[in-house]
């Protein structure tokens, strides 16, 4: 199964936390938010994942 995570927003409502760090990398429960999503997708049987990124996207790679 394939999935796509939309992670291209600027995270304006999370400012100033997102001024230097994209929202998907903000820590929640000791790990980045995007890791929570990836783990849930993997548990659901996703085998291919695409992440749409823009704002500070180079930090996601």
Image: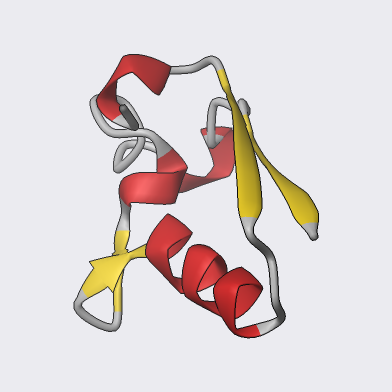
Occupied quadrant, residue 46: bottom right
The tally of labels here is: 0
User: Which quadrant would the C terminus be assigned to in this image?
Assistant: top left
Across and down, in percent, residue 14 comes to 46, 46
Name the residue at 71% across, 81% down: 44
- Between 23 and 60, the one lying in front of the other is 60
Occupied quadrant, residue 6: top right
Mark yes or no: residue 56 visible: no
Q: Is 32 located above or below residue 41 in the figure?
A: above
Across and down, in percent, residue 15 comes to 40, 38
- Between 47 and 58, the one lying in front of the other is 47
Q: Is 9 located above or below residue 46 in the figure?
A: above
User: Which quadrant would the N terminus be assigned to in this image?
Assistant: bottom right
Occupied quadrant, residue 59: top left
Across and down, in percent, residue 25 comes to 32, 48
Q: Is residue 59 left or right of residue 48?
A: left
Name the residue at 39% across, 64% down: 35
The structure's colour scheme is secondary structure
Name the residue at 28% across, 33% down: 21
Name the residue at 75% across, 51% down: 3
Q: Is residue 57 left or right of residue 43?
A: left
Q: Is residue 56 left or right of residue 45?
A: left
Mark yes or no: residue 6 visible: yes
């Amino acid at each position: 199964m394939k999935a796509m995570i939309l992670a291209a927003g600027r995270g304006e409502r999370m400012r100033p936390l997102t001024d230097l760090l994209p929202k998907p990398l903000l820590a929640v429960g000791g790990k980045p938010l995007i890791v929570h999503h990836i783990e849930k997708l993997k548990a659901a049987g996703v085998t291919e994942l695409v992440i749409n990124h823009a704002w500070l996207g180079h930090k996601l790679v």
